[in-house]
């Protein structure tokens, strides 16, 4: 009988079998049946275990037991690897065991042979990892995170787990989520004199973090170069395909950093190196994502030197071409995405926009000693996504920082970093999901994160 209850082979992932097996090997595989084809003597099962976008074919003899196998069910099989007529590996199964029924006819939202729109797939977050396109995105995401950690470790950076709960609004935009216990009874129990009831847990207002930068600076003043890759939160009423309420930020802080062009050079070198590694490590998944998104697989920005423009130079280019834009050119608001993409196209390469007006940037950025109306800040503009990174040199002069009109009153500790053996630092932050959009060509940022959160939507 074909069905048995116990197997002695060790389970192998399909991606491992396809890349490392040879004809005659006898692995054990487990996965979901994606498609069933029944011929006279054999049944052909396309199965997938989440390790690759490619289906893997099981060939099993046709009998009463195997006839019951249907799309969506989970099977475990042991057999012999052989080369199919199309040149791909397949498994001729000696032993097959059904592990779970698929029940696709009982309300399952996805048809195995149908391509579903991303908007529809997004309505079923708990099941969308079964969709090949989403699964490929998640594997690329996993690999990209690992390669970032590998690269930063090789460069002797120390990873810091920056807190999710904080008392400061790093960017000063007021786009923060308040945090407090949901239990009124607990708040009453913890009440203290002169503390508002809603603040009685921490004795002050507490928010979800918008950035780990200030905490990285604190750690860098004792550890040297540091970085974090952690969630960040923005309470914006924005439903654009480039924004989320919860997203991941890769942030780095470099000590003894006194030149903005050196910071830009590090960013370019790092992004190119990590991306080249990702192209080698996840080529099949990246190509699958790009094809699914109807995007080009030619990442031309890897092959050219990136450009640098001062803010004034960039503004002059935009103003000279203002009739080309649907969005208004406003020197008091920076550049729109349309204008950012124009600058990238104009330069024929990614572009660093450097030395910004102080009125457009936060308090912690270093003021130019030659022009106090400018700060040593940069934005990195990339094809398709516009702004990918923002960074700056940090103000290292305690007196200048203390005198800044936008310095929050509860950041005495931040000024003290400069007082007690301070040193010049610089750093940047990158929206990790935007980086994935840049690589895969995915138009909507909600499809490169497992569980997207945005205005009017926090499912699961």
Image: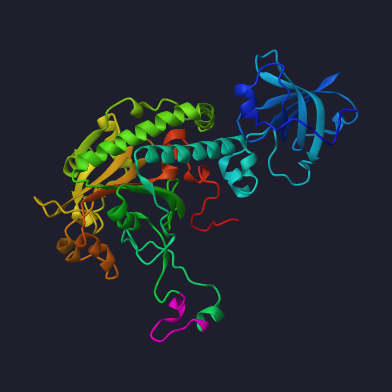
Question: Relative to 220, does residue 386 appear above or below in the rendering?
Answer: above
State the image coordinates of residue 208 (x, y, percent, origin top left).
43, 62
Q: How is the image coloured?
A: rainbow
Question: Relative to 234, does residue 390 appear above or below in the rendering?
Answer: above
Q: Is residue 135 left or right of residue 389?
A: right
Please give the count of numbered marks on the rendered protein: 0
Determine the image quadrant of residue 270. Answer: top left
Q: Is residue 276 visible?
A: yes
**On-image quarter of the C terminus:** bottom right
Q: Residue placed at 77% from the left, 41% from the top?
A: 102
As drawn, the residue found furthest toward the left would be 370
Determine the image quadrant of residue 315. Answer: top left
Q: Is residue 5 left or right of residue 337?
A: right
State the image coordinates of residue 107 (x, y, percent, origin top left).
75, 47
Determine the image quadrant of residue 93. Answer: top right
Helix, strand or loop: magenta stretch: loop
As drawn, the residue found furthest toward the bottom would be 193
Asked if residue 193 is among those painted magenta in the image, a careful observer would answer yes
Q: Which residues are magenta?
A: 189-201
State the image coordinates of residue 111 (x, y, percent, origin top left).
70, 37
Q: Residue placed at 64% from the left, 49% from the top?
A: 126
In front of the other: 446 or 405: 405
State the image coordinates of residue 420 (x, y, percent, origin top left).
21, 62
Q: Is residue 244 visible?
A: no
Asked if residue 125 is among those painted magenta in the image, a careful observer would answer no
**On-image quarter of the N terminus:** top right
In front of the other: 420 or 187: 420
Question: Relative to 28, does residue 435 appear above or below in the rendering?
Answer: below
Q: Residue placed at 31% from the left, 47% from the top?
A: 225
Q: Residue placed at 74% from the left, 37% from the top?
A: 72
Question: Relative to 320, does residue 203 appear above or below in the rendering?
Answer: below
């Amino acid at each position: 009988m074909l069905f048995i209850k116990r197997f002695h082979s060790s389970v192998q992932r399909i991606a491992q079998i396809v890349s490392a097996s040879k004809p005659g090997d006898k692995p054990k595989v487990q996965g979901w049946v994606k498609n069933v084809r029944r011929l006279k003597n054999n049944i052909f099962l396309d199965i997938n275990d989440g390790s690759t976008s490619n289906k893997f074919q099981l060939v099993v003899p046709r009998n009463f037991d195997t006839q019951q196998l249907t799309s969506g069910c989970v099977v475990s099989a042991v057999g012999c690897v052989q080369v199919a007529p199309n040149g791909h590996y397949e498994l001729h199964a000696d032993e097959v065991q059904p592990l779970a029924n698929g029940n696709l006819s009982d309300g399952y939202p996805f048809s195995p042979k149908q391509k579903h729109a991303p908007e529809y797939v997004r309505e079923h977050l708990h099941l969308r990892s079964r969709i090949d396109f989403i699964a490929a995105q998640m594997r690329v995401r996993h690999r990209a995170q690992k390669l970032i950690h590998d690269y930063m470790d090789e460069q002797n950076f120390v990873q810091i787990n920056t807190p999710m709960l904080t008392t400061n609004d790093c960017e000063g935009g007021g786009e923060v989520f308040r945090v407090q216990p949901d239990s009124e009874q607990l708040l009453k129990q913890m009440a203290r004199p002169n503390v508002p009831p809603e603040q009685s847990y921490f004795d002050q207002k507490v928010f979800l973090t918008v950035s780990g930068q200030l905490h990285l600076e604190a750690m860098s003043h004792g550890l040297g170069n540091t970085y974090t890759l952690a969630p960040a939160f923005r309470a914006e009423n924005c439903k654009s395909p480039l924004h989320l309420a919860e997203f991941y930020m890769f942030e780095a802080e470099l000590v003894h950093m006194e030149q903005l062009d050196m910071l830009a050079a590090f960013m370019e070198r790092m992004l190119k190196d990590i991306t080249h590694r990702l192209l080698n490590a996840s080529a099949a998944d990246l190509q699958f994502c790009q094809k699914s998104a109807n995007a080009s697989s030619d990442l031309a920005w890897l092959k050219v030197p990136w450009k640098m423009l001062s803010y004034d130079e960039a503004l002059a280019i935009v103003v000279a071409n203002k009739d080309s834009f649907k969005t208004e050119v406003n020197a008091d608001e920076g550049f729109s995405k349309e204008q950012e993409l124009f600058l990238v196209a104009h330069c024929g390469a990614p572009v660093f926009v450097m030395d910004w007006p102080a009125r457009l940037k936060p308090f912690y950025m270093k003021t130019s000693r030659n022009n106090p109306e400018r700060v040593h800040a940069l934005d990195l503009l990339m094809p398709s996504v516009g702004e990918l990174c923002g960074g700056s040199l940090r103000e290292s002069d305690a007196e200048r920082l203390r005198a800044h009109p936008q310095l929050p009153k509860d950041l005495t500790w931040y000024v003290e970093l400069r007082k007690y053996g301070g040193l010049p630092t610089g750093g940047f932050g990158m929206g990790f999901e935007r980086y994935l959009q840049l690589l895969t060509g995915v138009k909507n940022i909600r499809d490169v994160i497992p569980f997207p959160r945005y205005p009017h939507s926090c499912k699961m």
